[in-house]
Image: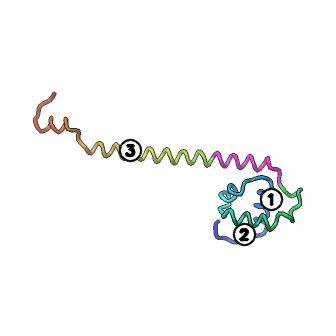
Amino acid sequence: MGGKKWNEEIRLKIVKEALAGVKVGVLARMYDIHPETIRTWIREHRDFIPPEDIPAADEHLQEIRRLQEVEQRYDRAVKSLGEKELEIEILRELLKKQPPLIREIRSSGTIY
């Protein structure tokens, strides 16, 4: 959603979430917005949002924790996948190379 014009309703929703305690960095990742843009919106709107319009932090914190856990699991899976791909590549390279003993046996015809 980066680079899009954000309507006032969405801006206020994001500002309210920030005022409820959700970190700007988390909101930036969730909505694909630069953190400084969110900070600007907070400065522009915070004085005009009544406290009763700010959502309960518990609901948002639970959702944010869930999203963070999903991100962490995804990051671990990507790292593990990368490690496995590297292991496979190393094993393929090793299979291409013949150990010296096998070369000797093949050239001499002698089995030890």
47 left or right of 109 in image: right
Q: What amino acid is found at the position of numbered circle 1 in the picture?
A: Lys
Residue assigned mark 3: 88
For the magenta stretch, what is the residue range?
55-69
Dot 3, how many residues are within 10 Å of its Cα: few (below 14), some (14-19), or many (20+)? few
Residue at image point 63% right, 47% down? 70
Give whichever of discs 1 and 2 has the lower sequence position.
2
Q: CA distance from mark 1 to mark 2?
A: 15 Å
Residue under the image location 79 percent in, 64 percent down: 12
Q: Position of residue 91 (x, y in %)?
A: 34, 42
Cβ atoms at labels 1 and 2 below 8 Å apart: no
Residue under numbered circle 2? 6
Kindly identify the amino acid type of the residue bearing the numbered disc 2: Trp
- Disc 3, SS: helix
The residues tagged by marks 3 and 2 sit, at their Cα atoms, a distance apart of 45 Å
Asked whether the residues under the numbered discs 3 and 1 touch, taking CB atoms below 8 Å apart as contact, a structural biologist would say no
Mark 1 or 2, which is nearer the eye?
Answer: 1
Q: Position of residue 2 (x, y in %)?
A: 64, 67
Mark 2 Cα shell of 10 Å, populated few (<14), some (14-19), many (≥20) = few
Of residue 49 and residue 4, the one placed in the foreground of this image is 49
Residue 78: give x, y in percent of width and height.
Answer: 52, 48
From the image, which quarter does the C terminus lie in? top left
Q: Residue at x 75, y 53 (%)?
A: 22
Residue position for label 1: 16
Q: Which mark is residue 42?
A: none
SS at mark 2?
loop
**Quick check: is 105 in the magenta stretch?**
no
The reply, left or right, for residue 34 in relation to residue 18 is left
- Residue 104 in which image quadrant: top left
- Looking at the image, which residue is at 41% across and 46% down? 86
CA gap, disc 3 to disc 1?
A: 48 Å
